[in-house]
Image (tube, rainbow, N blue to C red):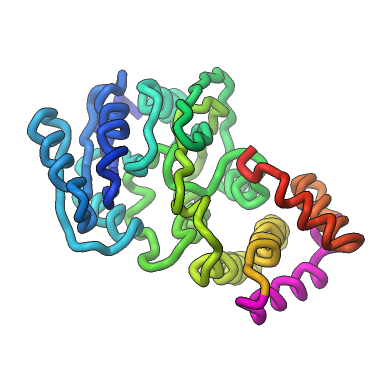
Amino acid sequence: MGVISLVSVIVPVYNVAPLLDRCLCSICAQTYRNLEIILVDDGSNDGSGQICDEWASRDGRVVSFHKSNGGLSDARNYGIERAKGDYLMFVDSDDYISNKLVELLCNMVKENHVEIAICDPVHVFEDREAEFSFDDRVSILSSHEAIKELLYQTSFLTSAWGKLYSKSCFSDLRFPVGVLFEDSALMYRLFETACTIAYSPSRLYAYCHRENSITTRKFDSDDLYIWEICKQMERHYASNPDMASAVCSYRMSAAFRIYLNAPNGRFVESVSECERWIRDHMFQVMKDDRVRLKTKLSLLLFCTSEPLMRFVYALVDRWS
């Protein structure tokens, strides 16, 4: 395959002025130096745009763009259209990365002749610092098996970050604009464009959970998008029984997400639909050997004691 000549790192930026320097320092400090760092200021009004321009003036690899606010997907797509690299990766501007991340992913691509390389995140809460870790194990998966891993949630996440993609993967695909869970809507389609995918359990991406972020804010109507995305997946794999089982597992997790998080008295119709779906598909999921233990335990509690299920759910760290 030869040497990867250029990696385009796309960073959507929106009102993250206090965190942006940390993110960009981590990218510019990469041991893999042949980078194009694309900053997409998505209509920020807190000075983030000026910070982007300052970084572009001090490091020739950094390019700063400014556009009207269109959301995370729109900013990523804007960066994809302008990327010159053979390979793409995404870093959210409130996160940061190990200085070895790009080097690791590039080596995985080069040594294993794959189109996509993946590593794990470190989940960072409050003001704690990430503890990155390297693991020399690498798994090589077919596209089909990688999609099942994705949907069964047994290893890597659906998130766009923490992955390196051949630019060709995006030839006919873009992130859906205006919806939450845009990564879930796109990732299985991206995986379909690859012949093989490499995965390392090295934890080199610091995924920062902060107040009012997607992972910590209160449930609202946007959270229901995951249910529609699951329906799209189901239609997409309707003629593939093997993949349909994986989709069923993923949809069960989404059903519980809505059923257990939607506020009492709100979204009644959606919660009722999820409850019916859980009851209709629980035996199918319980019989599937690849379904996660936590999902099966949720089903057992769902059948025996809803109060206990909600109590346990409140105690469980969903990111562990």
Q: Quadrant of the N terminus?
A: top left
The x, y position of residue 34, in whole percent, is 23, 26
Q: Please say whether residue 198 is visible from this viewpoint.
A: no
Most distant residue in the bottom direction: 269
* Rendered position, 12 above or below 172: above
The span picked out in magenta is 265-286
Q: Residue at x 52, y 68 (%)?
A: 220
Viewed as shown, does residue 43 lie left or right of 285?
Answer: left
* Rendered position, 58 above or below 268: above
Q: Quadrant of the C terminus?
A: top right
The x, y position of residue 274, in whole percent, is 70, 72
* Rendered position, 292 above or below 232: above
Most distant residue in the left direction: 57
Q: Is residue 171 magenta?
A: no
Q: Residue at x 25, y 43 (%)?
A: 17
Secondary structure mainly formed by the magenta segment = helix
Task: Please tell me how many numbered marks the rendered image carries.
Answer: 0
Q: Residue at x 27, y 38 (%)?
A: 20
Q: Please say whether residue 161 is visible from this viewpoint.
A: yes
Q: Is residue 280 magenta?
A: yes
Q: Residue at x 81, y 72 (%)?
A: 280
Viewed as shown, does residue 182 lie left or right of 64?
Answer: right
